[in-house]
Amino acid sequence: MKKIKSIAAFTLALAMMAGMGACGKTDSDSDSKGGSANNAGGGSVEVDEDGIKTFTAFFAVPGNEVDKGNRVQEAIAKEIGARCEMKWLTGQTADEAVGIMIAGEEYPDFIDGSTGYSKLLDAGALIPLDEYWDDYPNIKNFYSEAEWNSVKVDGHVYIVPQFGNDYMYSTDCVHNDEAFWIQTRVLKWDNYPKIETLDEYFDLIERYLEANPTMEDGTPNIGYEILCDDWRYFCLENAPFFLDGYPNDGCCIVDRDTHKAIDYNTTPTAKRYFQKLNEEYKKGIIDPETFTMNYDTYISKLSTGRVCGMVDQHWDFNDAELAIKSQGLDDNTYVPVGVVIDKGIEEHYHSGSTLDVSNGVGITTSCKDIPGALKFMNDLLDPKILTLRNWGEKDVDYLVGDDGIFYRTDEMRSNANDQTYINANLCPYAYFPNYKGMDHDEINACNPSSQPSEFYESLPEPVKECFDAYGVQTYVQMTNKSGENAPWYPMWSYSNTFTADTDYGLAKVNMDEVKHEYLPKVVIADDFDAAWDEYMSVYNERCDIDCYLNALDTEIQRRIDVAEGNS
Amino acid sequence: MSKNVALAADGNAAALKAENKKSFWKQVKNQKTLILLSIPFVVYVIIFCYVPLVGWIMAFQNYKPAKGLLNSEFVGLDKFKRLFGVAPFPKNDVFLGVIRNTLAMGLINLVLGTVCAIAFAILLSEFRSRGGKKVIQTISYLPHFLSWVIVAGIVFDVLSMENGMLNKLLVGLGIVDKGVNWLAEPKYFWWIVAFTNLWKETGWNSIIYLAAITSINPDLYEAASIDGAGRLSRIWHITLPGLKPTILILLIMNVGNVLNAGFDIQYLLGNGLVQRYSQTIDIYVLKYGISQGDYSIGTAAGIFKSLVSIILIFLANRTAKAMGEEHLF
């Protein structure tokens, strides 16, 4: 019996271990590549009794799921005969979520893989849109032919980058990018001083904290937070290139004269920036828990309104700001300041709309009704539907003045700031292709937050006061005018496509790993110089920086050639 | 399921051992009902545990999902070399560190988990009031049913510098004068994981020992007390020896599981500051295999893990056998 018992137990044990190797597919035949084989007879997309199709989508970015039966979603469905259930990233990174889908070979109809896009391409998960799009002019004409060419991979278009298409001209009012953010109450307390340098920024927060250790209700104020959770640790690590006056290329500084990539991690500015953080940490200005908290903790800390400042992308803490507003803590929302390391450097925090060729929504090989899906995407770009998506329903979400200009009542405005209301009533289909700039009526801006009159009116009083003090009307104007983008911008759309099986990709993985561990160490170190030296020696030993920079140099040159028409 | 088969076969154990090869078919005939009954489970194991092993080929390829297993390029042992950072690949000790963490956390869990579960089971079995015993048992099981995400949330709260229970207690008692940032110190990480595991699983793990204690013949206790044995010596001379076979079998099986030191808790509690001590093999596989898109290196790491686990099981079994104790095979 011992034998039988042992075999059984051994098998069990093996079974547990085999799990690891089991994620690969064992059967590699797939007839879905062309897609056409699957959609004969309209396919099997779910169709309800009203004849409305329901597609599925996954966007590998954080977002809010709209409720079932969302009012505007149903209104759009009635118009175009289709709706889409959208899922967003929760509790995973984009790469994990996409990696797992690829391993299982099951995809939703629409997907935006975010940083996982190159993996989707590698896996052959996306259908070439340009083979089908002749019947769908709204999609085909969404970009110019030259722009589509830059989106193409191996001669085909697999995704539609959703953003970066201004109709007529840009009407951005919100700086939806990265900056040093600071609460209006802090600026107000010091009579709206001009903040230009990193030292001035922290000096103000220090003085404010000393004078106001707690909020009105007694909650202790926190001077500065640094989010360091997984891929979001850009809040800690990428400020050095901004401080040097360069735009957000993400993975490097590009020298404006030599067009060579420079590693921003080892510049003198980087050292000064981290030394400053180290000083502030020791002074207790930076939250001691900052490096152990995850994204959820960060958002909940910010939502209390007790955090004076931080570096972040606006889209990353938007949820927290909505929460602050909904508690009526209007004094505690944030405005961006364009901080540099030394006076006289021109900052470049804001960049104009760019066509980001590494992000976009595509249709997957799992989609059973490709023409239907394309029609859906095409219909969403119809002027009438665009207004529904961006403004909502007439007379419910906005009113129309005699001159054709859209405006909202105070109630409509506060509704549009209330997450619960948004989930039940509004449906911008945010990650489907959308125009920015002007609405197609050419009178209004594409959405309320870009409509100058509407935007200013909907601001909380303290923000209006702050803007008035600085003589600006929008968040965007708080930083320098963006100017023309360089032809290579943004380089992150290239580095996002790296995978660990190339040498330069591995170099980046190693850089991230070393920085993830050592940068927090450097900030909390008792002896900054020793910690910095240790970091630098590990960094240089573990990471093949030259290989990494060479790859970037090649891409910069390629992009310049494309822009000049030499390729 | 296999357990049932094993138990059912128990009856003819002695006979079975004495049989020789000739009578193999006779045996099959005798046990045909049992064999028929076990077929579905054997098929299950083959389909879900052995067939997927085909995927191990990936570790020897530069696997690309679009090309599939059949068309990906074979690279021999390159992925393993890269994993360990041996020539011609750049030196890299990340994976070695990962193995150390996995082994360390696995062993701490194994030792602490076993000892505490046994101690807890004995304490419970000595409990006089039936009602009190039931209540304690139920309460101690409960954490087992919480998901790790919730447990991690609780741990965060308890260890928080600002309002954490633990820091408040320590400061209140005057042991430290300022809250300790527990999760930022690499040296604490393994122990935080170990104690979290203990809190969550001790009650659950004690069930099997409790069951084993119940099956010890009560006459033995009676005889011992007549001979003048006190409570402690009854535990030492009767309960523990009675538990020995159970303990050994579970230990051997768990040794094979040492490398499954966990994923959830390390993943949820880890951060950049402690990553060198928090990453386990499973996290490594997720990070490099799934997130970075290098499925081959992920599979290579997985294979390595399986091999080490098998070796550990054989070693443990050998040791038990050599000591003349209960063993698996």
Image (spheres, coloured by chain):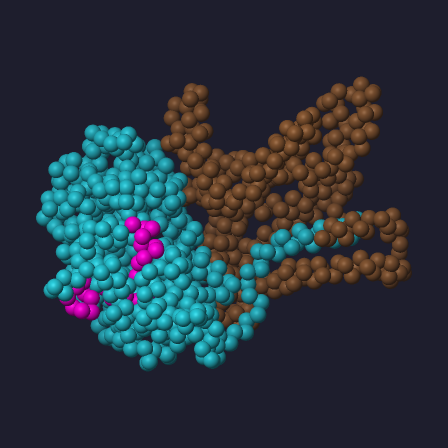
Chain colours: A cyan, B brown
Q: For this rendering, which residue is in front, A4 or A425?
A: A425
Q: Main secondary structure of the magenta part?
A: loop
Q: Quadrant of residue A192?
A: top left
Specify the quadrant of the image occupied by residue A157. Answer: bottom left
Q: Position of residue A529 (x, y in %)?
A: 31, 37
Give the vertical position of A530 relative to A452 (above or below): above
Q: Which residue is located at x 73 percent, y 39 percent?
A: B246
Left or right of B227 on screen, residue B240: left
A566 relative to B32 in the view: left or right: left
**Residue for point 24% across, 58% down:** A397
* Residue closer to the observer: B32 or B274: B32
In the picture, which quadrant includes the C terminus of chain A?
bottom left
Does the image show residue A183?
Answer: no
Which span is picked out in magenta?
A418-445
**x, y percent for residue B163:** 39, 31
Q: Is residue B200 above or below residue A563?
A: above
Q: Residue at x 82, y 29 (%)?
A: B219
Number of labels in the image equals 0
On the image, the x and y values in percent for residue B17 come to 86, 50
Please determine whether, in this image, residue A111 is positioned above or below residue A462.
Answer: below
Front residue of A427 and B23:
A427
Magenta stretch contains residue A425 = yes
Q: x and y percent of residue A185 in the render?
A: 19, 38
